[in-house]
Image (spheres, rainbow, N blue to C red):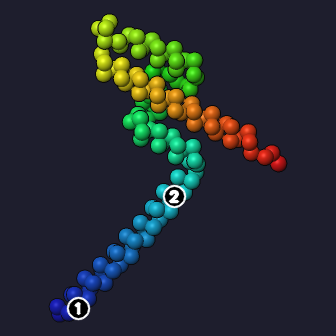
Amino acid sequence: MAKYLAQIIVMGVQVVGRAFARALRQEFAASRAAADARGRAGHQSAAASNLSGLSLQEAQQILNVSKLSPEEIQKNYEHLFKVNDKSVGGSFYLQSKVVRAWERLQEELRIQAQENREKEQMPKT
């Protein structure tokens, strides 16, 4: 009786193990496909988010910009930087957040400009 019980348990563990391994392989494949779909720019943007500590959306919210317009970003950055200057009673913490958001958006603009240059250099068929 104990022998049969042990065989049932071993067989059950094998079945669950195979199912888990198959699910893991499918998840890796789906993750790889999603990363490929995002393309190289997605990787650069994600890397920029990791370096700056801010996502693109957070940076846009901090500087109150809806689209990546260099003029609007610069105008809002200068205003918020002056308003949060410690010498006029502002917060150094908020001022540093404004600077980090500006840096993050500048990096995103650089990535977009690089993408545009690469698209222009591609041969047209």
Q: Element under label 1?
A: helix
| Amino acid type, callout 2 | Arg
Q: Element under label 2?
A: helix
Which label was assigned to residue 32? 2
Quick one: label 1, few (<14), some, or many (20+) residues within 10 Å? Answer: few
Q: Residue lying at the far front in this picture: please name it.
A: 87
Q: Which residue is painted at 27% across and 84% down in the image?
A: 10
Quick one: label 2, few (<14), some, or many (20+) residues within 10 Å? Answer: few
Does 94 appear above or below 32? above
Residue corresponding to mark 1: 4
Q: Which residue is painted at 56% across and 25% down in the image?
A: 67
* Nearest to the observer: residue 30 or residue 98: 98
Q: Residue lying at the far left in this picture: please name it.
A: 2
Residue 91 visible here: yes
Q: Residue lying at the far top in this picture: please name it.
A: 88
| Amino acid type, callout 1 | Tyr
Which label was assigned to residue 69? none
In front: mark 2 or mark 1?
Answer: 2
Query: As drawn, is 39 to the left or to the right of 125?
Result: left
Q: Which residue is painted at 51% across and 14% down in the image?
A: 75
Does 18 appear above or below 84? below
> Which mark is first along the chain, 1 or 2?
1
